[in-house]
């Protein structure tokens, strides 16, 4: 019963989150990852990812919340979703339940949320858009302890795709 409630809660989060779009273009760098026992242990963050994570943490701290700790595995799962969105030319939360179940199983998370966005040029612009959206703001201000973030650029049109996953561990 508890698992059903948890899955239902995750589905509610999926349906309440709506993707963002706007702004212009920029370029990112490639990431590297290594997997050990199902856990990604290495992830190389680009400057935009580091800046976006810092802005999210600065915002959380400014309103009296804890800063979130980055976890490479969560960023890798975020990157996988960015690559899916680019390959399918969509902005959505497809397979969020599978991503969250992986994070729950592999990292022992008890709660998972996700924000996605598309075509924002700067970390400041995407954060501003997320904070202007009730569902996205709820995740940013949520009862989480960890997060991961990936920003990938579509090589065909130069547009950025953002996936930000939050977890309470």
Image (cartoon, helix red, strand yellow):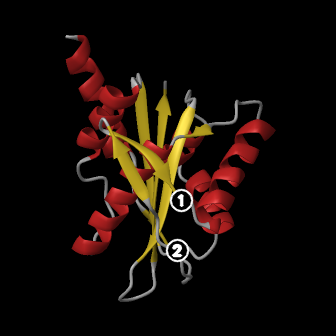
Left or right for 97, reference 59: left
Q: Residue furthest right?
A: 62
Residue most toward the top? 1
Point out residue 50 in the picture as x, y percentages from the top left corner. Answer: 64, 58
Q: Residue at x 44, y 61 (%)?
A: 32
134 lies above or below 116: above
For the N terminus, give its image quadrant.
top left
- Distance (Cα) linking label 1 and label 2: 9 Å
Q: Which residue is mark 2?
A: 29
Badge 1 density bin: few <14, some 14–19, many ≥20, Cα 10 Å: some
Vertical placement of 158 versus 102: above or below? below
Tell me if residue 118 comes above or below residue 135 in the rendering. below
Reading the image, the residue beneath label 1 is 44
Q: Earlier in the sequence, mark 1 or mark 2?
A: 2
Q: Secondary structure at mark 1?
A: loop
Q: Is residue 136 left or right of residue 16?
A: right
**Which residue is drawn at the image coordinates 47% and 33% (left, top)?**
167
> At which x and y percent is residue 63?
76, 36
In percent of width and height, residue 93 lies at 31, 53
Question: Which element carries disc 2, helix, strand or loop?
Answer: loop
Answer few, some or many: residues within 10 Å of disc 2's Cα (few below 14, many 20 plus, some between 14 and 19).
few
**In the rendered structure, are the residues bearing label 1 and label 2 in contact, judged by CB atoms less than 8 Å apart?**
yes
Q: Residue 119: horizontal and vertical position, in percent?
A: 48, 75
Residue at 54% across / 83% down in the picture?
25
């Amino acid at each position: 019963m508890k698992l059903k409630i948890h899955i239902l809660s995750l589905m509610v989060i999926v349906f309440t989150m709506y993707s963002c779009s706007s702004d212009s273009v920029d370029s990112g760098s490639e990431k590297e990852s290594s997997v050990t026992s199902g856990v990604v242990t290495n992830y190389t963050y680009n400057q935009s990812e580091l800046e976006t994570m810092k802005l999210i943490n600065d915002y959380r701290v400014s309103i009296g919340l804890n800063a979130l700790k980055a976890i490479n595995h969560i960023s890798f799962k975020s990157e996988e979703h960015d690559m899916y969105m680019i390959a399918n030319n969509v902005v959505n939360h497809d397979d969020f339940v599978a991503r969250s179940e992986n994070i729950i199983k592999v990292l022992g998370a008890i709660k998972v949320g996700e924000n996605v966005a598309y075509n924002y040029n700067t970390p400041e612009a995407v954060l501003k858009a997320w904070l202007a959206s009730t569902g996205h703001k709820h995740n940013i201000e949520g009862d989480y302890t960890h997060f991961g973030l990936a920003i990938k650029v579509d090589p065909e049109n130069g547009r950025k795709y953002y996936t930000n996953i939050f977890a309470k561990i």
